[in-house]
Amino acid sequence: MRDEGLFSEGDVVLVAVSGGVDSCTLLFLLKKFSHVLRISLIAAHLDHKIRVNSWKDRSFVEELCKRMEIPVEVSEVDVPSLWKGSGKTLEEVAREVRYSFLEETARRVRATKIALAHHSDDLLETVIHRLVRGTGPLGLACMRPKFGAFVRPLLPFKREEIEEYAKIMGIPYVVDETNYDLRITRNFIRHKIVPLLRELNPEVESAVYRLVNISTLLRNFIEEIVDEFVKENVEEQGEMDVFEKPKSDYLLLEVLRRLLQRRYGRVPEYEKMEVFLRNSNKVSFRTNLWTSVYIEKSYDYVAVGKTVFQGSYKLPVEGGIVEIFGFKIKIKVNYEGEKERLWIRNRKPGDRIVVNGKREKVKDLLIAHRVPTFYRDRLPLLVDEEDNVLWIPGVCVSDPLKERRIEVELLKAPKGFLKGG
Amino acid sequence: MRDEGLFSEGDVVLVAVSGGVDSCTLLFLLKKFSHVLRISLIAAHLDHKIRVNSWKDRSFVEELCKRMEIPVEVSEVDVPSLWKGSGKTLEEVAREVRYSFLEETARRVRATKIALAHHSDDLLETVIHRLVRGTGPLGLACMRPKFGAFVRPLLPFKREEIEEYAKIMGIPYVVDETNYDLRITRNFIRHKIVPLLRELNPEVESAVYRLVNISTLLRNFIEEIVDEFVKENVEEQGEMDVFEKPKSDYLLLEVLRRLLQRRYGRVPEYEKMEVFLRNSNKVSFRTNLWTSVYIEKSYDYVAVGKTVFQGSYKLPVEGGIVEIFGFKIKIKVNYEGEKERLWIRNRKPGDRIVVNGKREKVKDLLIAHRVPTFYRDRLPLLVDEEDNVLWIPGVCVSDPLKERRIEVELLKAPKGFLKGG
């Protein structure tokens, strides 16, 4: 335990004790080594009310802690009634309740660590569960030995080893009969699938423990790369994030997931991302993720979020500096005689501009200048009283503008607008 | 198939046909779309002699190809006799023989692609097999849709779908009765484990197909990062490779594996690497991998290979430039009177050098100058006729050297020697 660096001197450790063999053994071991590790212990027990006799477990834990001279924090939550109509499985609800109980209790009693009794059989079961339910490779980095305040000192050991140790040391515990209910996914995996895997490899827990260890290192590595990419390359543009498309599809995928998580707190199913990845070599491509939220690629840039501009605007300008949608433009009007009235507005279908004696379509000019699709409707155009387009910032000025005493300048453009997108 | 970019116009595709439903359906489908894809087909069948009646499959495939007007390449290999005493499983031997038959045949008939009939059930079975046997997260990137010349057009489909299609289209095939032999690992997984996984999630193949897809992207990404790191940061130093320790343990792990694979064609078990990783924050640490091969960390640098210098050398120097173990030193002797005799040699236990009037231990000076451990025994010391150390290149010159008419210069040092390691 010291080797893994799970505890630091002076830690106040909240130990989650259900009363089962794993958690009782954990409590026993931590008590035994608390002097060497220089940590102090508090036990925590949640009565989840899933079984009618769950109060028995509670009494057992209270009695045990009393005998071991360890303070114990107990709480009860009626998990079955929370579960009804939640749309989740009973296991999921129980898990959420348990973790929030532990976190709250830790805060209250000022515990610096929370110790969980998970072992390598739990790890194997979790990996199989995730694999079957669907996960990416980083999702295999589950049940990390250390995650935030949570630590899992028993993770390298097998259930068998723990039970053996408990027997030798005479550690008392209660048996949870729901452990044998095969309707519970975890039990189905434990009692039906794992024995078959063990037939193929008696050391399957170690194989999976190794996989999870390496996956955890890999996950940390990828998270750092993504953090750095986001920090260095992503520009927040109002309701969307824009960045230059990285060469690696994997990095693209993870960056998109990170940005969506940050903005909307959720990530779409992989299939939608895959459609985008498969088409991301096209000049322009857009995938709808959910209501109004898109991933859009145009030239070398990617935008994610509300990339489609659905409004319209027309603002009178008196001259001066205007900032809108990441564009910063400067307009200076040298009035003589009658005051000229000017507006900026977004483009409209059919917009044209007179340049070098030709009436060009605004759309064609935007394409010729490789302006990414997601900027085209946001871009502020300067128009006169008759709604003629005088200036497309960063692209061209019209002949009429040249003839008038109006000075224009694009001071700032959003990421990828000018670099040929 | 076009969407995935598996084939290019003009491809000559060698189709591996065992005679089973999967490969016959693949042959049928490729034939059907060969005009659209603009590819030409050659079938390939290997009689593996594992079953006494394997010649029947061969006749069946030959007859089928004749009717379909597809040329067929057939060969036979006595896999069971190759297997005996090979120390491998029959399945492994059969697999190796099959792949080398396909590669050789492709070369001979100038095929540009080799099509395999693997589907998503095969993928699921392979993932379970690897998981149980032990694999890292990148090892889940198995059965890639495209790998070198190999392509797997049926990978997105389930066995069930393929069988259904074969039935509807009346595609003929033979049934391999060894498919039901549970002593074969793959069949055990197929018939005993997969049905249980399907009870938990009827779409488990899709879940795993997705996992493998993402793992493949991830694997490509990591391989590029490792390639780049090796190219930019690793210096080959005779029998070892030296590089500055990257911050990420995962990157360190993969770089070490890449370098060991490159130099020795093998990689140690993860446990040995893990011992090194766990200790890699120490100032100096060394792990033995196998005979004379170590990973060694010292200060900020890592060396891998034969890091321990087991020989000794003593070379006379007349002056001039000497290159040894990545050190390049220049010695110029301005003779006056009697010719002075000088040598360079590696250090010996107890070596001392007189600097600023003090007799210092060479070892202490190397430590004080943060010279990585793996350079200390290789470093060329300049000594005189009485074997007194005159110069430790990059570290210090002795008082006697200063008094003599000898000029010394360290022209080049190996990676990390001077930067404080």
Image (spheres, coloured by chain):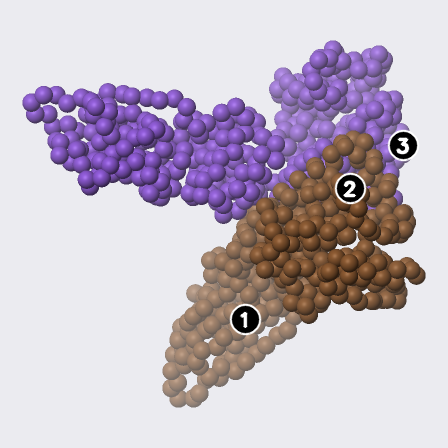
Chain colours: A purple, B brown
Distance between the Cα atoms at labels 1 and 2?
Answer: 70 Å
Camera-nearest residue between B22 and A252: B22
| Residue drawn 65% across the image and 51% down it | B33
| Residue drawn at point x = 58 percent, y = 63 percent | B241
Residue topped by disc 2:
B168
Task: Choose the circle earlier in sequence order: 1 or 2.
Answer: 2
The furthest residue to the left: A337
**Type of amino acid at the residue the image marks with label 3:** Lys
Q: Is residue B281 found left or right of B396 in the rendered image?
A: right
Q: Position of residue B343 (x, y in %)?
A: 52, 79
- Per the image, the residue denoted by label 1 is B325
Mark 3 and mark 2 on one chain: no
Q: Position of residue A172 (x, y in %)?
A: 87, 25
**Crowding near the residue tagged with mark 1, few <14, some 14–19, many ≥20 C-alpha atoms within 10 Å:** some
Residue at horizontal 29 percent and vertical 25 percent from the top: A345
Q: Which residue is mark 3?
A: A167
Q: Secondary structure at mark 2?
A: helix
- Please, what is the three-letter code of the amino acid marked with disc 1? Phe
Q: Give residue A120's position: percent from left, percent from top.
A: 77, 37
Q: Quadrant of residue B256?
A: bottom right
Is B15 placed above or below B357 here?
above
* Image quadrant where residue B260 sits: bottom right
Q: Is residue B71 above or below residue A115?
A: below
Query: Residue B95 vs residue A287: left or right?
Result: right
Front of the two marks 1 and 2: 2
Q: Identify the residue shown where x is 38% and y is 79%.
A: B405
For the question of whether residue B398 can be seen, the reply is no
Per the model, the C-alpha gap separating discs 1 and 3 is 58 Å
Q: Chain of mark 2?
A: B
Q: Secondary structure at mark 1?
A: loop
Task: Determine the chain carrying the residue at label 1.
Answer: B
